[in-house]
Image (cartoon, rainbow, N blue to C red):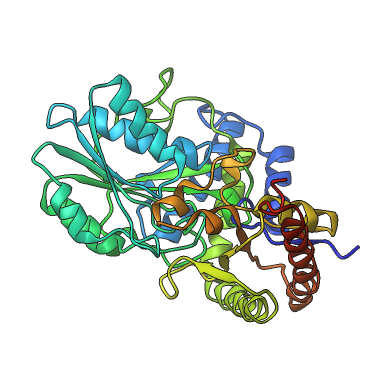
Amino acid sequence: MHRVYLDHAATTPVHPAVAEAMARCLAETYGNPSSIHGFGREAKKAVEAAREQVAALIGARPQEIVFTSGGTEADNLAVLGAARARRDRGNHVITSAVEHHAVLDACEHLAGREGFRVTVLPVDGAGRVDPDELRRALTPETVLVSVMLANNEVGTVQPIRELAAIAKAAGALFHTDAVQGAGQIPVDVDALGVDLLSLSAHKFYGPKGAGALYVRKGVRLQPLVHGGGQERRLRPGTPNVPGIAGLGVAAELARREMAERAAHVARLRERLLAGLLERVPDLAVNGHPEERLPGLLNVSVLGVEGESILLNLDLKGIAASSGSACAAGSTEPSHVLKAMGLAPAALHGALRFSLGRGNTDADVDRLLEVLPPIVERLRAMARGCGEPAGRA
């Protein structure tokens, strides 16, 4: 069976050079970075080398990088840490309706448990925040604005530079969840004007369990956990040296190969989109047509349940998704697509195909061969029973 992986937005396969660096670290660099002896110094050197590599990827200074266990922890440290640290200035936080649940749930916690007021900005039909909506939402009590760089379900890229400038003019800090964008599109923290930025290694061919939070010099955060002085006391605990080393190598490779990778997946995405529009009737494309990630395609197959399509694709060896991997198993339609105003039929028929560096024309052609008959069969079944396909 020709197995095809089209779910890189959920996670990416580890790059061979990353795996090699991690294996070497596990075998040879096993000291505790906090120890002062030679073994500890070697481990600390590996951690600091990775800090420089991650900083270079996003145009930051090494001392502004705080290592975490991944994007969710980085988002929580940014949102909860910044809001709590600035409580004396105000109790208002702003975010958007299409954020990852790592941000939305952190904001919900602030509102439900800590007395903060949270404003959730709407988005347009392409999933973008209107800067004027942010201007209207800001108050003297606003301490933090958090809007993601690129959406993990539809790939829409937000106008972060403009949004951050608006927030800064009002005296608020600006955080962006760049987990889906960092390593895929150019990111420069100074050009964007952000104070905090989250990223995760496994979205750009690094290991799971390793991520980072960029914290601009001078920005105060309250740590989520306590018990040591590591990572400027913002993330105490013995560092995951192999994971951090893997993150560093993945960041270096992403910085060097970004343009080539982007061109490759963008070409495949256009090939896939053209084929789907030609072969699958009643298909709608979700997300912004231009301001988007190069390798992510979200479509709605009307009249068919997306989960049923995915199960049938999996039987053919093809992996895709209906949305965020973190929401897998949920019976609720995507909160992102709902916020974009999609009709119920489009919500239930949504599919996400996310391409990566290892995908080929043959992978796209295999999907285009397999998907149309699956859709046709499920629609025929739906017509026969008088119910939406896959929900009988």
In this picture, residue 21 sits left or right of residue 313? left
Question: Dividing the image into 4 quarters, which one contains the C terminus?
Answer: top right
Q: State the residue at coordinates (33%, 36%).
A: 79
Question: Dividing the image into 4 quarters, which one contains the N terminus?
Answer: bottom right
Residue extending farthest to the right is 1
Q: State the residue at coordinates (57%, 41%).
A: 326
| Viewer-side residue, 277 vs 388 | 388
| Viewer-side residue, 185 vs 106 | 106
In this picture, residue 178 sits left or right of residue 349? left
- Quarter of the figure with residue 358: bottom right
Q: State the residue at coordinates (56%, 48%).
A: 324
Q: How far across and how far down the image is residue 112, in percent? A: 31, 23
Q: How far across and how far down the image is residue 77, in percent? A: 38, 34
Q: How far across and how far down the image is residue 244, in percent? A: 56, 43
Q: State the residue at coordinates (11%, 49%).
A: 170
| Viewer-side residue, 142 vs 200 | 142
Q: How far across and how far down the image is residue 208, in percent? A: 62, 43
Q: Is residue 81 above or below residue 188?
A: above
- Quarter of the figure with residue 368: bottom right
In this picture, residue 349 sits left or right of residue 232? right
